[in-house]
Image (cartoon, grey):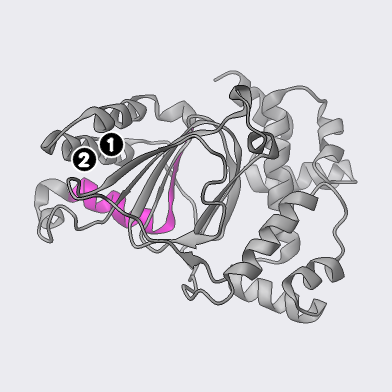
């Protein structure tokens, strides 16, 4: 899977960028950049891909992505049609790990910051329920001038380092191929899967999307992601089931079929394997937050 390299601009008066986006899927491609990315989802939900991790994101969630780690945010279809009630809203910060000078991170006082940036090589996820205090640093950074802007970023990184709820996303064995030649292929696979996961997907059909015969596609997908396409598809379906559980509008059996499963026992087994909880326990934990 070969992601697209994106260039990030900072401006003449700033050493790192802070950007607010009100449009969904502004960078809805499998891409990477040399800067670290810290993104806060104020409004909107969808599916996120960080390295070989596939999971849902929701309002209030935050992700720190390391340099050159491929990622992709795909908002749910409801956020692509405009309107105030379905508009997406994110704040994104891009910075290099050396913008404050080569020796800064070597200072013993900055061990926590150095450690969290090392962890970010695999991506760090901070759920909405755990980052209330971190959110305030984003507002301060946007409004601050001069050194206070840098201090705000340091405080934010320290808060992430101290958070007991921060979890690592991509597996330690994930090795991205950073050339550009196959970016269109992986984006076509993502779009096809996210548009069709509720239905039965034939291997021949998805292989055709990739421009490969079925046997070659299976080898290709496994060699690039470390997982089978079936596993990848199951993770997307379970992520969508989590969304439906949070919305609490369908029974567990109803959302099983709405998520693309045709067997409740299979759904229940896969849900617990991926989330570590039963659907009922997951819903109860979230609604009681």
Reply yes or no: does residue 121 show up in magenta.
yes
Residue sitting at x 89%, y 45%:
263
For the question of whether residue 226 can be seen, the reply is no
Image quadrant where residue 287 sits: top right
Determine whether the residue tagged by mark 1 lies in a helix, strand or loop. Answer: helix
Q: Over which residues does the magenta segment extend?
A: 111-127
The quadrant the N terminus occupies is bottom right
Residue 181: where, in percent of width, then height?
55, 77
Reply yes or no: does residue 112 show up in magenta.
yes
Residue 108: where, in percent of width, then height?
10, 51
Residue assigned mark 2: 154
Residue assigned mark 1: 156
Mark 2 crowdedness (10 Å alpha carbons): few <14, some 14-19, many ≥20: some
Residue sitting at x 52%, y 67%:
3
Residue sitting at x 11%, y 46%:
109
C-alpha gap between disc 1 and disc 2: 5 Å
State left or right for residue 266 relative to residue 67.
right
The quadrant the C terminus occupies is top right
């Amino acid at each position: 899977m070969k992601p697209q390299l994106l260039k990030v601009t900072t401006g003449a008066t700033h050493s790192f960028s802070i950007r607010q986006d009100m449009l969904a899927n502004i960078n809805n491609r499998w891409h990477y950049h040399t800067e670290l990315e810290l993104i806060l989802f104020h409004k909107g939900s969808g599916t996120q891909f960080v390295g070989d991790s596939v999971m849902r994101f929701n309002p209030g969630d935050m992700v720190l992505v390391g340099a050159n780690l491929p990622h992709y945010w795909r908002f749910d279809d409801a956020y692509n049609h405009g309107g105030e009630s379905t508009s997406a809203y994110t704040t994104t910060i891009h910075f290099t790990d050396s913008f404050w000078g080569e020796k800064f991170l070597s200072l013993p006082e900055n061990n926590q910051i150095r450690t969290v940036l090392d962890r970010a090589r695999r991506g760090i996820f901070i759920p909405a329920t755990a980052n209330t205090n971190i959110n305030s640093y984003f507002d301060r950074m946007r409004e601050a001038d001069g050194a206070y802007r840098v201090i705000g970023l340091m405080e934010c990184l320290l808060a992430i380092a101290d958070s007991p709820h921060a979890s690592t996303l991509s597996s330690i064995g994930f090795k991205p191929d950073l050339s550009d030649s196959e970016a269109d292929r992986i984006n076509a696979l993502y779009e096809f899967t996210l548009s069709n996961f509720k239905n039965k997907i034939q291997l021949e059909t998805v292989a055709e999307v990739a421009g490969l015969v079925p046997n070659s596609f299976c080898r290709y997908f496994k060699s690039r992601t470390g997982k089978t396409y079936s596993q990848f598809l199951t993770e997307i379906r379970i992520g969508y089931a989590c969304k439906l559980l949070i919305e609490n509008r369908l029974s567990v059996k109803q959302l099983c079929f709405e998520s693309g499963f045709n067997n409740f026992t299979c759904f229940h087994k896969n849900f617990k394997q991926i989330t570590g909880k039963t659907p009922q326990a997951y819903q109860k934990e979230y609604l009681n937050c």
